[in-house]
Amino acid sequence: MVKFTQDQVDELNLKIKTTDEALRWVSDNLHPKVAKASSFGAEDAVVIDIMLKINPKFRFFTLDTGRLPQETYDIMDILRKKYNISIEVLFPDTNEVEKMVLEKGMNLFYDSVENRKLCCEIRKVNPMNRMLNTLDGWITGLRRDQTKVREEVAMFQIDHGHGGILKINPIIDWTWDQIQEYIKKNNLPYNSLLDKGYPSIGCEPCTRAIKPSEDLRAGRWWWEQGEHKECGLHIERKNTD
């Protein structure tokens, strides 16, 4: 596994400022042990398009939780055919899901934050961990304007929660308007839920459309109170070494 020091990452953040520069560096230095994590929202449409213009052999993976909207499956197949790419689909452990559902029910996530986090852990975090254990770096679609939690995120980070691999956030400085403009300008296929008021897309029972005055991620786990709602994939862990 390739390891980066904080000084090396700081230097990358000083030298590399644009999405294109970041992804070209990733292609030159980490491919093929780097992959884009995709939930097939608007950000993914943009990043996938830019990545494939740089390296047609870039890798992509997604987490099939078993509770995704049909629209997400539809756009996955559309993108596979358009770009002639493979998408590595990760599934949760069957035994873990069966045990959870047997003990807590199909819709346990509505009962408590603890249950919701357990469901996210089993259906998303654990499969993600299995994939990241095989990589030197992973690419996200994070943006600073999505949530307060993400306001301080850098383009390059050491992911201490996943063995110190490199986490690359190539569109971290993009705005929601820029994302939409790129999609329209380049006539990109995108998840049809975006046209139904879903700027952030997750599992079907845990995502709803937002109202015009609401935050872009207000539709995620909308029944929970508070602003810092995450599934656990992007929780930053401090280095304790």
Image: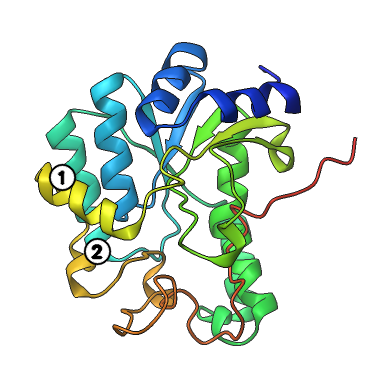
For the point 65% across and 76% down, the residue is 115
Dot 1 or dot 2, earlier in sequence:
2
Residue 195 position within the rendered picture, expressed as x and y whole percent measured from the top left: 17, 69
Task: Report the front residue among 235 and 93.
Answer: 235
Amino acid at the residue labelled 2:
Gln
In the image, residue 89 sits, relative to residue 42, either above or below, namely above
What element does badge 2 sit on?
A: helix
Task: Report the front residue among 117 and 139.
Answer: 139
For this view, does 166 lie left or right of residue 55?
right
Task: Report the front residue among 141 and 59.
Answer: 141
Residue 143 position within the rendered picture, expressed as x and y whole percent measured from the top left: 46, 52
For the point 62% across and 71% down, the residue is 228
- Name the residue at the top extreme: 28
What element does badge 1 sit on?
A: helix
In the image, residue 146 sits, relative to residue 84, either above or below, namely below
Residue 4 visible, this orientation: no
Between the C-alphas of marks 1 and 2, the distance is 13 Å
For this view, does 99 lie left or right of residue 219?
right
- Picture quarter with the C terminus: top right
Amino acid at the residue labelled 1:
Ile
Q: Which mark is residue 70?
A: 2
Residue 179 visible, this orientation: yes
The residue beneath circle 1 is 78
